[in-house]
Image: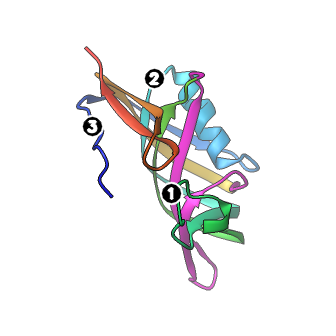
Amino acid sequence: MSGEVWSAQGNIGRVLVFRLPPGLDLMDAIRKQVEAAGFKSAVVLGGAASLRRAVLRNVKSSPKEWPITDENRHYTTVEGPLELLALSGNLARNADRSFMVHLHATVSGADGAVHGGHVVKGAIILSTGEIAVAELTGMVLTRSFNDETKTYELKPETQE
């Protein structure tokens, strides 16, 4: 594989810390808070939460040809109660200017079993979610079609 590296430099702007109440979908709630704050792009600094459920996606096989599809993925629904141990990701703009929330998480159950992967819709807050997100300034994150992988990939771009 020989792809172009997309990169940009910018700064951390405002930092948004918020508490999510029971019953909210983690991805939707983060998107709504970032939109309400007026951020153009953001990175997730981290989070701590209890979850009723987590829905995680992982790659299980390499595609014969791009793009990676659901044939190459494994979805795991982990029923809680769960502890959110680690959270990372970003919020980038799609072509229609809406946010695409890209999150990865590690969660554990009461027995200590740990699961991790790409977070998909359906990760629900049990009692609380405490999330920290940073605004990016001097750059914007967008999703652009990548000819090599045949999917929309993160494209950071410097802004003056």
**In whole angstroms, how far apart are the C-alphas of marks 2 and 3?**
17 Å
Magenta stretch, overall SS: strand
Is residue 11 in view? yes
Question: Is residue 13 found left or right of 81 in the rendered image?
Answer: left
* Residue at image location 32% in from the left, 27% down from the top: 157
Q: Secondary structure at mark 3?
A: loop
Q: Which mark is residue 150?
A: none
Q: Quadrant of the C terminus?
A: top left
**In whole angstroms, how far apart are the C-alphas of marks 1 and 3?**
20 Å
Is residue 73 in view? no
Estimate the x, y position of residue 152 in percent, counting from the top left.
Answer: 51, 40
Estimate the x, y position of residue 94 in percent, counting from the top left.
Answer: 55, 29
Report the colour scheme. Answer: rainbow
Which residue does the numbered mark 1 point to in the structure image? 104
Q: Amino acid at mark 2?
A: Lys
* Residue extent of the magenta highlight: 96-125
Q: Which mark is residue 7?
A: 3
